[in-house]
Image: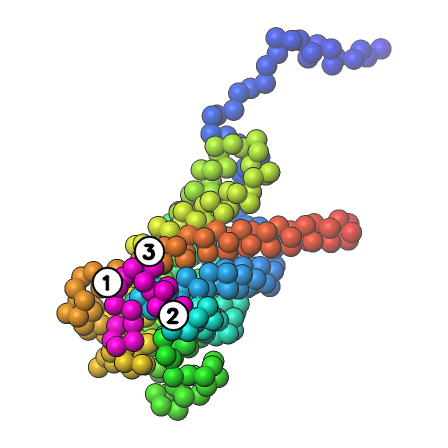
């Protein structure tokens, strides 16, 4: 007759095999989140729209500070820029151009995040700590999304300027098309890509690294603190990437606002020519105009965006899980 052998393994001296100190199975990141392409697009679209709408007034201040000519605020002080906008147009002046942002942010971020997730899955080789794959995926994502967002970004920035001659989004679109042609909508595309390529490379690699580090600090409560982790990692990534790429953002603003309410018009879309003009007119400090509101924009904006995006992904993961359980 067979006997129960289980008591033999109940020796109090028996200990489980210890795992390496950096082994945390509960926070292992899957190579892919298991979502459909359209689900990444919806989550990204909502995240981008919420981010830009929430932070739009700060973006308006930044645009005023970066433009050169007779229309911009001369001081680089955020307080002076804000006071000038409120004095000339009131609180509504902080929201001029928000319609263009609303039309562009959703579709652009849908492309942005879906391309990022697709490229991350393809390039990471299943390794969630592949920083090079995260950076490269961010670059590919920004090239695609900027093609969608740049025209509306140009409209948005022209409407943000003090004493803008345009009545609204469609008036700006029709007048620019009639006076300058479609090329005006993409005058800053090359600069935007050159700015956003390093921006997203720094942003995504920093975000993934900080997120991983924060989850490893307290792995036992990682699931309970996901919102805080995503927000903190996003804020750190946004702030660092914003400061590093401010000079190219100044160039982008110059190209998008050229010829409007006294702002300089350039002979070509050459980045070198624009930088030369900025330095001649305002010195090297002109290349970092607006870095404070830019950082103040991107830190909380990234925190909002990543938190919203990850929440959207979690929602779809639960939906997919319930659907799979039901079909089973």
Say which element carries label 1. helix
Q: How is the image coloured?
A: rainbow
Residue 58 percent coordinates (x, y): 41, 61
Measure the C-alpha gap from mark 3 to mark 2.
21 Å
Q: Residue at x 57, y 33 (%)?
A: 221
Of the two numbered discs 3 and 1 on the same chain, state the one appearing first in sequence. Answer: 1
Of the two numbered discs 3 and 2 on the same chain, state the one appearing first in sequence. Answer: 2
**In the rendered view, does 306 fall on the left or right side of 312?**
left
Q: Residue furthest right?
A: 1
Say which element carries label 3. helix
Name the residue beneath numbered marker 1: 287
Measure the C-alpha gap from mark 1 to mark 2.
26 Å
Name the residue beneath numbered marker 2: 87
Q: Nearer the viewer, mark 1 or mark 2?
A: 2
Q: Tell me, yes or no, whether the two marked residues, 3 and 1, touch with CB atoms within 8 Å.
A: no
Q: Which residues are magenta?
A: 68-86
Of the two numbered discs 1 and 2 on the same chain, state the one appearing first in sequence. Answer: 2
Q: Residue at x 45, y 53 (%)?
A: 300
Q: Is residue 85 magenta?
A: yes
Name the residue beneath numbered marker 3: 292
**Badge 3 density bin: few <14, some 14–19, many ≥20, Cα 10 Å:** some
Residue 168 percent coordinates (x, y): 47, 81
């Amino acid at each position: 007759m067979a006997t129960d052998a289980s008591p033999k393994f109940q020796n109090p001296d028996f200990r489980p095999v210890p795992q390496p100190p950096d082994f945390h199975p509960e926070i292992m990141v899957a190579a892919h989140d298991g979502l459909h392409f359209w689900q990444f697009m919806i989550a990204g679209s909502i995240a981008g729209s919420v981010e830009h709408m929430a932070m739009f007034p700060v973006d308006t201040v930044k645009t005023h500070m970066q433009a050169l000519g007779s229309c911009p605020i001369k001081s680089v002080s955020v307080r002076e820029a804000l006071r000038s906008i409120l004095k000339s147009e009131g609180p509504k002046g902080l929201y001029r151009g928000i319609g263009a942002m609303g039309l562009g942010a959703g579709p652009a971020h849908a492309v942005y995040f879906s391309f990022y997730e697709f490229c991350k899955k393809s390039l990471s080789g299943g390794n969630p700590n592949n920083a090079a794959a995260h950076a490269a995926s961010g670059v590919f994502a920004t090239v695609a999304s900027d093609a969608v967002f740049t025209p509306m970004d140009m409209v948005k920035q022209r409407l943000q300027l003090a004493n803008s001659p345009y009545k609204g989004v469609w008036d700006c679109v029709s007048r620019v098309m009639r006076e300058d042609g479609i090329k005006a909508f993409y005058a800053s595309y090359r600069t935007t890509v050159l700015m956003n390529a390093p921006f997203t490379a720094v942003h995504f690699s920093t975000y993934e690294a900080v997120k991983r580090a924060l989850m490893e600090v307290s792995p036992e409560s990682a699931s309970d603190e996901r919102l805080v982790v995503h927000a903190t990692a996003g804020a750190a990534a946004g702030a660092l990437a914003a400061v590093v790429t401010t000079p190219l953002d100044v160039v982008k603003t110059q190209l998008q606002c050229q010829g409007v309410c006294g702002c300089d018009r350039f002979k070509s879309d050459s980045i070198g020519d624009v930088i030369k003009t900025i330095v001649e007119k305002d010195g090297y400090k002109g290349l970092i105009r607006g870095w404070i509101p830019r950082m103040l924009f991107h830190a909380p904006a990234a925190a909002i965006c990543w938190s919203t995006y990850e929440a959207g992904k979690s929602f779809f993961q639960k939906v997919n899980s319930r659907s799979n359980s039901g079909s089973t």
